[in-house]
Image (tube, rainbow, N blue to C red):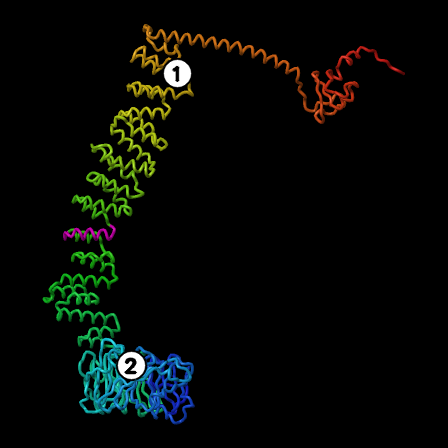
Amino acid sequence: MNAVITQVRLMFNLDVITDCVVSSNWLYIVVNSMSVVRINLESPSTVENIKIPAKHGPNIGSIYKIFTDSTGSCLLAVTTKLQHFFYSDSSQKQEFNLISKLKNTPTVSAVFHPSRKGDFFLGTRSGSVIEVSVDIKAGEHFFKRDLKYTSQIWKGERNENVNSIIFRDNGREILLTYGHEILKWKTDSVTNMEKFMSQKPTVLFNNPFEQELKELVESPNSSSLAVILSPQHVGVLHKGDSEFTIYETENPKFLMLSNFHLIAVTSDSIRITGLLSRELVQTLPLPDLKQIKGASIDYKSQTFWVFNDEELYEIKLENETTGLWKMLAKQGRFSDAFEVCDSAESKSYVLEQHGYHILETEPDNTVYAAKLLGSSNAPFESLVLRIMDTTKVKNNSEALVTLIKTRLKHTNSKFQQILLTSLLAECGDCVDIHQYAYDAETIQQILRKRGDFQKLIDFSISIKDYRTPLQYYISNSMWSNALELIRQHGSEDKELVYRYSSITLKYCPKETVDSWMRLSDLDATKLLSGLIDYSEVYRGPVNENQALRYLKHIIIKEGNKDEVVFETTLSMMCANNDSNETELLNFLKERSLNHYDNDFALRLTLKFKQYKCAVYLYTLMGLYEEAVILCLQVGGDEMFNMSIEIAEKQASNEKLRKYLLRLISKQAIETKGPKAALQFIHLLGIGDLLAQFPEFESLDELAPEVIRSLEHTKNKLMSINSEIDESLKASEEIQTEIANFKKQSVLVEPGEPCQLCHFPLAVRKFIVFPCQHGFHYDCLQKNSRAHYKNDIQGVEECALCDEDNLKSITTPLTIDF
């Protein structure tokens, strides 16, 4: 620690400094009898001058003492005529307001309430304490309403000075110097100060030198108190002590406390004593040996100030805490030592020593000791050995776990984290391992070796390794646990489902399929192996076949169209040997649009004798002859009727229909006799039907039917002959009409001219005669005889080649010369 005293250079001249206080970087200086200068030390160029209004006249005296609150925003000034003035930076003007009700109050000390702004307490020469409350926003005129109240809240038995008042613990503790005593009031809560101080105080200290105690000062962290006891003695109450320690100091005038040092201002020097070492640390000579008039402490910024009549000085304690941590640690004050540590190494040293101290002195608090040791940088191996070797440690296992966990939180080395997490697993604690670097395989091996299978399962799940707990469940036949794990985590790791499908289907098929049906986006092809293995050994009812249940679900409900899945389902359904084949047939019909191999399905149905399904597949493939042949080969009324239905459905192909019916009728005649042919009389002609009988087969039973058929054929042939005659007659009539139509129609070529004007016919209305001569309607009208001019439709002969014009050919020409 090095103390430096520096003179403060102000931007204005000071005549005489009467008093000076500093709080929260606000400096107040009494520069003359009627005003106080206010300077913001963070911006010292701005200076405010707070004055007592001139209206109060010269009878108020001059300012000799000022007091401020912890924020530096309120100021109380006391004059030599015992007048009291109040200022707040919340007011509108930089002027003091007179508190007239406090006139002639012999104030010697004052303190502001730590939390109630505008409330302050006065200590008087008559041994009383007065509480005052004012409105901090009072304007230029300080009316009665601005003074909320004044009240004497305590009066001592003797008329001795109350030279200082200190509030501690947010007002729940009050200290004051009264004569040669320091009195103390303390409570859990304060609602009324008068009621609080009406209680009998405790005498904290009684000056053995029988001298009146002056100002009691407190350190910024409230850990120490100091007071002048006599011209040669100073009393200090150190933190943790119950009594004041008395120091000899030559002629102390003022005292100030930092967190770790006592600053005593004497007549010729400033003496700085360490509160921890309780030894003199440094002595500073006073500049120019001028008499110091007062001292002030800024508790917020922890700066120290002294002044004389003309000059102001600031005392700075540089590197105050250097080396203190080791001294405090040696004294066993580890919390204080840690607070003043200035490096990582010093903090580690304090934590280590604190941990060792607890191990040796508090055997029931070893877990806390391990936490402290783990927070230090001491070698981990030595800490482990120290905990294990300490005979007073009753449960070093918990302490070791705490040590490991704490060290994990304070190390960034990946290698060390892997080592520590493995050690933590050795101790059986894996709750927080996944937060750090770890080697999963090593930890799982450790847990297996320890037999901590539940911890192994919990750890594996926490790192999303689901296979390890699954293997454990399966190897121990814990099927419900295995399936629950698959249900919970199968959606994020589908390989769990695929890999263990066979074994879970084998031992709990329904539950396994239930879990699969709850999961989405499973690749069914990866489950086929397990499903096939299960189905091959299954011998129960069809409706309880879980493999089929799942495959039908994904095909019907989920719309799976994978060819392999469909063919596997067909194989299982065919192998089922369902005699009525209803379910398989319906399945094929409903899925007929899916992409599956018809040939494969046909081979399956034939192999497992699912003939109805085979017939359906034949028809689906257009192999109607094969379908009919299969029906006939299988036999039975149902299959026989099915073959007839197949043939009848081929109405669009009469040739194929008759061919199929001939096959069926032949089979019927061979198996059931000639009478069986009766049902085909209306489906096949008698000729086609007779061709199916053997050569020497007797047809007596069929004679009536044959006769009726022949008569029907005869009638039909006669009807056909009649229809032919009518057709021939109609044909001749049509030919005649065509010939007549040819006479009545003429083909007009494009561009053909009128035979009279030689312009194209198509430009105007025209008439064409059977002789192929065409005329414009108007041209023909002009050229026709008079009696046809009004009815040109009556013209029957061509105007060019009619009978009259033809006769004129033989008439000789007459030429007139």
Residue 622 in picture, x, y percent from top left: 37, 24
Residue 771 falls left or right of residue 81: right
* Sequence-earlier tag: 2 or 1: 2
| Crowding near the residue tagged with mark 1, few <14, some 14–19, many ≥20 C-alpha atoms within 10 Å | some
Asked whether residue 315 is in view, the answer is no
Residue at figure coordinates x 13%, y 70% from the top left: 360
Mark 1, residue position: 658
Quarter assignment of residue 70: bottom left
Using the image, determine if residue 544 lies above or below residue 308: above
Quadrant occupied by the N terminus? bottom left
Residue 4 in picture, x, y percent from top left: 30, 83
Residue 246 in picture, x, y percent from top left: 19, 86
Q: What's the CA distance linking mark 2 and mark 1?
A: 125 Å
| SS category of the residue bearing label 2 | strand
Q: Nearer the viewer, residue 146 or 744?
A: 146
Asked whether residue 386 is in view, the answer is yes
Using the image, determine if residue 558 lies above or below residue 581: below
Q: Which residues are magenta?
A: 449-464
Which mark, by number, is residue 317? Answer: 2
Quarter assignment of residue 634: top left
Task: State the predominant SS element of the stretch in magenta.
Answer: helix
